[in-house]
Structures are given as structure tokens and as C-alpha cells.
Amino acid sequence: MSSLYLETKEGSSVNIKGWILSIRDQKTVLFLIVVRMREQVQLVIKDPKLIDKCSGLNVNTAIEAVGTVKRTDRVPSGFEIEVKSIKTIVTPKKRSPFDLIGKNMPGIETRLDMRSLDLRHPLNLALFKLRAYMLSSIREHLTANGFLEVNTPKIIATASEGGAALFPIMYYDKEAFLAQSPQLYKEELVMSFERVFEIGPIFRAEPSHTVRHLSEATSLDAEAAFFNNEEMMELLERTLVHVLEDLSGRSEMAIIKAPKITAITPFSRFKYGEIVDKLASTGLHIEFGDDLDSAALKAWGDRVGGFYFITEWPNKLKPFYIKPKDDKVSLSFDLMYREIELSSGGERIHDRRVLEKRIREAGLPVQGFKNHLSVYDYGMPPHAGFGVGIERLLMVIAGLKNIRDAVLYPRDIRRLTP
Ligand code: AMO
């Protein structure tokens, strides 16, 4: 009898270690819900002497129990354990400051201050299991489509997304930065590996405190040689539909009461200029060249609903590496869900001279990109890519109101601990 695997066959003898999530005392029977390996297991204690012994147990106490498996319809797992012996492994010194099974959860800041405890809540267990399944599903889909998973440096010498929102750090005796994205590396890598993707941290010194911005987020970045803008949008929408289908049957989706999301490809495509014209005609103060602020995105998101792309953004609103379509607009896209931006991407400049010109126009020091630019002399293929905010995607899939709920230990302008 080992505690490594939990045998669930009727009559099996098992040894279980875990922490107590709830206690229900019915005088002649005591029910303990114990969390083991993120699953809830019901322990049933009928022996009066054992019930007596359990009087000191509390929520969060870690226990070890030995017992026999009984099949039952009383619990969703279909089995419970009739306990023969039980002992305490760790007794918490303090009672939990919030209820771990009830609906009365405190506000997000209080929960985040005690995040390790908060993560014991069944809703959080389900949410972070979904996050892990979501990442596996993305990996599986992109790998099946010929993409190689890579990891690029997070300590970098130059900005990849423009000079603002950078975190400077000391790198020995030089100034360096935390990577805003793997943009320049993933572009260089299409020269050798053709199709690459990365799931990793991105760092943004976001100056404001919003429900959609983190200072440290997780990004899915994909990049492929010989893809054009439209092919990249297709890959992105197919990847999303794959993930949504994979997650839809999961029990965790019911536990967290995830909203029903319809995603039928192709997603609608709206040109930036068309959105500006239509919004301006409804009285919104917006002109061609203005960024679409939260009011504009809210108005448009309410109007069209669901997933959609915004394409052909003005060149000046997009980063230097995005390929212009003409003098005015670019071969770029943002993937939206209602008013939430989930992803942005596009076709890239693969001509060194054009790239240099765009870097200069963006007000960035060309000298800082010397190494990156030199790669373009050796036959950089045309390529395209996208970046998806993993926490924003989880927000949409799980129906979360605040992005901080989608990350274990969020970082924002006010929070550096825990
Ligand atoms: P962008 O800067 O639009 O594009 O970022 C891509 C996606 O990452 C998410 N994201 C964030 N999520 C939470 N907090 C933040 N502070 C934050 N910043 C960005 C968003 C966003 O759509 N290199 C390009 C991508 C590309 O062209 O391939 C880039 O980084 O969901």
C-alpha cells in the first residue's frame, strides 16, 4: 500500500496524505474532504474512538489516513474512503482568514496578500488546472503544425517593442532590460527553424493599474517564414478554436462556471479605417491615426461581439518591424474578444534598409540594433507572427473580471509581493 498512487477500486486499502478542506460532523459520522494531488477525496469516519480523536482537526490541517475504498454516488468522484486510522502531519498555527469552500471570498487584494492560501480554494485549483491544459493544448496544436518550441533570452540589450514600458536592470557594469517580448529573436529564428513558438514571460513597465495589464505577463509568441498576414491570422484562429474545443469538455469548466463562448472560423475582419469611420459617425471623437482607446473598443466590441480581427492599422500605430502595406496602413492585425485585445501580429519587414528606416522613424537608436540588422544580410525570408497574452486568453475563457486572477503571483505597478 503506497501513497504514490491512489487506488480507487472497491475494497482496496489505501494510504492518503493531504490537507483538510472541510469538516462535516454528523455526530455518529464524520466527513472530511481532503485535497490530495489537487483532487477532493471524501473520508468517512464512523468509529466513535476515531471521531473523538479527530476533534482537534481543523481546515488546512495536513493528515495521513489509512482506509478502504467504497464506491458511492454521494460524491462526484464516485468513491470515498472509510477510515481505519488517521494522524496529523501538520497543524496550522492560525485559522484561515477566509473561507476555503464558501462563496464569501474577500476582495482580490486581500486574497493576493495571502495568495498561497487563496490558491487552495477549489475554484483556483480548477482555474490553474485549466491554465495548464490550455498551454498543453497550444503546444500540441502548434507542434502538430510544424512549429518548434524555443526559449529566448529574457535579459536583453535593446527594446523590442519601442522605448517606453521598459524595465532597466544592471547587467554587471552595463545597463540592460527585461524582455518586453521575444520579437527580434523569434524573427531571427525563422532563418534557421522556419516555424517557431515560445511560451514565456514578457515584462512591461505599465504605468497604470488596470484590470487588463500586468507588469509581468505570459505570452505565446509564434513566428513563421513564408507566412503572410492572412495565413498568420488563420493559424491564430485555428489555434484558438482547437484550444476552446479541447477545454470545452473539462469538468473544471463547469466548476468555475466558464461562460459559453462561440468561436466559428473565419472570425470577422474589420479594417481599422472602417471602425474609425463608423464610430465617428455615431458621435465618438475619433480620427484616422488615433489609437483605439478603451471607449472606442468598448463601443465596437459591444456592436460586433465575440472574436474578431482589426486589420490594416496605421503604420505609425504599429511597431517598427511591422510591414507597411502602403504609405498609410500596415499588414497588421489585432485579435479581439469584444473589447479585450488578445493578440497582435502581422507580416514583418524582411528588407534591412526598410527596417533601418523604420527604426529611425520610431526614434530608436539604429546602433542598438546593429547585431539584429546584420542578420538580414544573409537571406532573411519573408515572415509573419503573432503574440497572444496567455492571461488575457484565460480571462476570456474563464470569464474573469480581473487579469490578476489568471496569474499565480501577479506583478503590477503596486504589487511586488508575494
Ligand atoms: P503586443 O505588445 O501587442 O505585441 O503584445 C501581445 C499581446 O500580449 C498581451 N499583453 C499583455 N498582457 C497583460 N499585461 C500586459 N502589460 C500586456 N502587454 C501585452 C496582449 C497583447 O495583445 N511582439 C508583438 C507581437 C507580435 O507582433 O508578434 C507584441 O508584443 O494580449
Image (cartoon, rainbow, N blue to C red):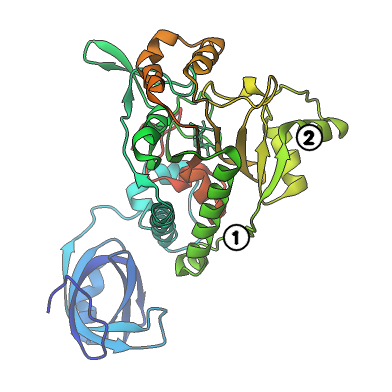
Q: Is residue 263 above or below residue 157?
A: below
- The residue closer to the viewer here, 205 or 239, is 239
Q: Quadrant of the N terminus?
A: bottom left
Question: SS of the residue at dot 2?
Answer: helix
Is residue 211 among the parts visible in the rendering? no
Name the residue located 47 percent from the left edge and 22 percent from the top edge.
165
Q: Amino acid at mark 2?
A: Glu
Label drawn at residue 259: 1
Instruction: Name the residue beneath numbered marker 2.
Output: 274
Estimate the x, y position of residue 125 in percent, counting from the top left: 39, 59
Work out whether 282 lies above or below 233: above
Please state the horizontal and vertical placement of residue 124, each as a whole percent of the image.
Answer: 42, 56
Front-lying residue, 226 or 46: 226
Q: Residue at x 38, y 27 (%)?
A: 179
Q: Position of residue 144 (x, y in %)?
A: 40, 56
Q: Is residue 103 above or below residue 368?
A: below
Whichever of callouts 2 and 1 sits on the residue coming sooner in the sequence is 1
Q: Is residue 163 left or right of residue 284?
A: left
Q: Residues within 10 Å of mark 2 (few under 14, many from 20)?
A: some
Look at the image and tell me in which quarter the C terminus lies: top left
Query: Within the image, what quadrant is residue 340 found in?
Result: top right
Residue at 20% in and 59% down: 91
Crowdedness of circle 1 by 10 Å Cα count: few (<14), some, many (20+)? few
Contact (CB < 8 A) between labels 2 and 1? no
Mark 2 vs mark 1, CA separation in Å: 30 Å
- Residue type for callout 1: Pro
Q: How many marks?
A: 2
